[in-house]
Amino acid sequence: QSALTQEASVSGTVGQKVTLSCSGNNNNIGTYTVAWYQQVSHGAPKTVMFGNSLPSGIPDRFSGSQSGTTASLTISGLQPEDEAHYYCSTWDYSLSEHGMTVFGGGTKLTVL
Amino acid sequence: EVHLVESGGGLVQPGGSLRLSCAASGFTFATSWMHWVRQRPGQGLEWVARISDDGVSTFYVDSVRGRFTISRDNAKNTLYLQMNSLEVEDTAVFYCAKITVPASSLIDYWGQGTLVSVSS
């Protein structure tokens, strides 16, 4: 069971706005910045967001936010190429003696 | 342009060993913290290990501590993962990943991955 909870699946139509959520606690999201990773088909993950900062080359239809123990990734103007699995991740200082990086279980985003 | 290229994966019997390598280019490897992350077949991402820029500080997920060793050679711009006492449950694609800023856990670049299969 993942330390961070994500929806198993989300769907939307082309052009729609969708929001993916990531829920944790004060030991992780409540304290540390969350990143979001996109994984298309069986390819390598790609970073699409750190907190609310967009990495170079990522379209500005992606945006992120974080409040309390929840983080969100919003895609405004959904495109077919956005169909992928999305994982949230951050640090957790309570699950291991020296802390550890944790991932959510992933959300499968389907573009209808 | 940042490139991370993993190698060393393959088929190994339970109890065996493998050493993964990750050749890094396009950034200052010697000042970058690094991760290994794995993905079991059909599963999500799982953090495996993290190493500081000077190699002095290492961190592991509990399930691999004592069996896996993360290390680096900054002169060769290469990250390693020595895996001993491999178990069937270690079967996964292993990714090396560059951490954004020192001591953080957030990743900005990922390699393409190398497949490790543990089976008799």
Image (tube, coloured by chain):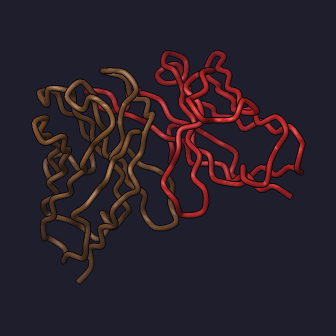
Chain colours: A red, B brown
Image quadrant assignment for residue B51: top left
At x 51% / y 49%, what residue is drawn? A45
Q: Quadrant of the C terminus of chain B?
A: bottom left
Q: Is residue A66 left or right of residue B83?
A: right
Foreground residue among A54 and B60: A54
Q: x%, y% of residue B108?
A: 45, 34
Q: Quadrant of residue B29?
A: top left
- The answer to whether B73 appears left or right of A49 in the picture is left
Q: Looking at the picture, does residue A48 appear above or below residue A92?
A: below
Q: Give the number of callouts.
A: 0
In percent of width and height, residue B105 lies at 39, 29
Which residue is depicted at the point 60% across and 21% down? A53
Q: Nearer the viewer, residue A36 or B1?
A: B1
Q: Is residue B63 above or below residue A68?
A: below
Indicate left or right for B9 with B41 as reference.
left
User: Looking at the image, which residue is at 31% across and 21% down?
Assistant: B103
Height in image: B26 above or below A13?
A: above
The front one of B29 and B86 is B29
Residue found at x 13% / y 35%: B74
Quarter of the image where the N terminus of chain B is located: top left
Image x and y of residue A99, in percent: 32, 28
Residue at far bottom of view: B120
